[in-house]
Image (cartoon, rainbow, N blue to C red):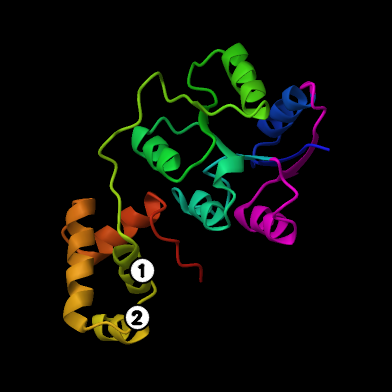
Amino acid sequence: MYHVLIIEDHSIVAHAAADKIKASPLAPTVEMRATADEALSALRAAPGKWDLILLDLEVPGATGLSLASDISRMGLAARTCVLTASERTDYEAQIAAMGFQGYLLKGGGLPVETLQQDLLRVVAGEKVFRSSGHKPAADAPRLTRRQAECLGLAAGGLTTKQIASELDLHPGTVDRYIHGALLELRCSSRAHAIARAIELGLIAAVRG
């Protein structure tokens, strides 16, 4: 049995996508979740169940690419296709870099028939990226593992010394990693870099 999870808070969009997917020769079963927390609960409960995940980036509880980043860390990127109204080539580039199956646009003047065809291609296992006909930006920001770790801990309110203690690094090394992250993200402050990194899904949003 082919199982599909649709993560979408607009019921009309979710049911329209489900109806088209069910018409596939695979005759998939489809489940829907409307928030980030509901989606993560379903994925954590049965990570191996889902053959395809359709992800709206802007469901309640998600910020920028935060939910996409969570899904990537769960090892489910290759089974996930973003279905969004956000025509951002930087988002698309980051989604492609994380190994997702596709980036499809809903609305925005795109013919309904095109989206329907793209959905069936995704169900068939193809990689499909479509952002207003533009290619993904080749210069999308990328952080090293250490840069992301240091910036992520800074996002949680830790000082340089606390981050150094947490990662068993010298404080000067932590500052160097964070400075490198600021340069890569083209930001002038830690706060700005943290917000930018969360928006791009490079670090996880801190949930209170």
Q: Which mark is residue 167?
A: 2
Image: 160 above or below 52: below
The quadrant where residue 204 appears: bottom left
Is residue 84 in sight in this rendering?
no
Contact, mark 1 vs mark 2 (Cβ under 8 Å): yes
Q: CA distance from mark 1 to mark 2?
A: 9 Å
Residue at 69% over, 34% down: 14
Q: Give the structural element (helix, strand or loop) at label 2.
A: helix
In this view, the residue in front, 170 or 89, is 170
Residue 96: x and y in percent read: 43, 38
Image: 101 above or below 46: above
Q: Is residue 12 magenta?
A: no
Residue 35: x and y in percent read: 64, 51
Q: Give the structural element (helix, strand or loop) at label 1.
A: helix
Residue 138: x and y in percent read: 28, 35
Image: 121 above or below 163: above
Residue at 35% over, 77% down: 157
Residue 67: x and y in percent read: 53, 52
Picture quarter with the N terminus: top right
Which residue, given by chain and number where applicable, does mark 1 sit on? 149
The quadrant where residue 140 appears: top left
Image: 161 above or below 27: below
- Where does the magenta region start and end? 23-51
Residue at 57% over, 54% down: 75
130 relative to 28 in the view: left or right: left
Amino acid bearing label 2: Leu
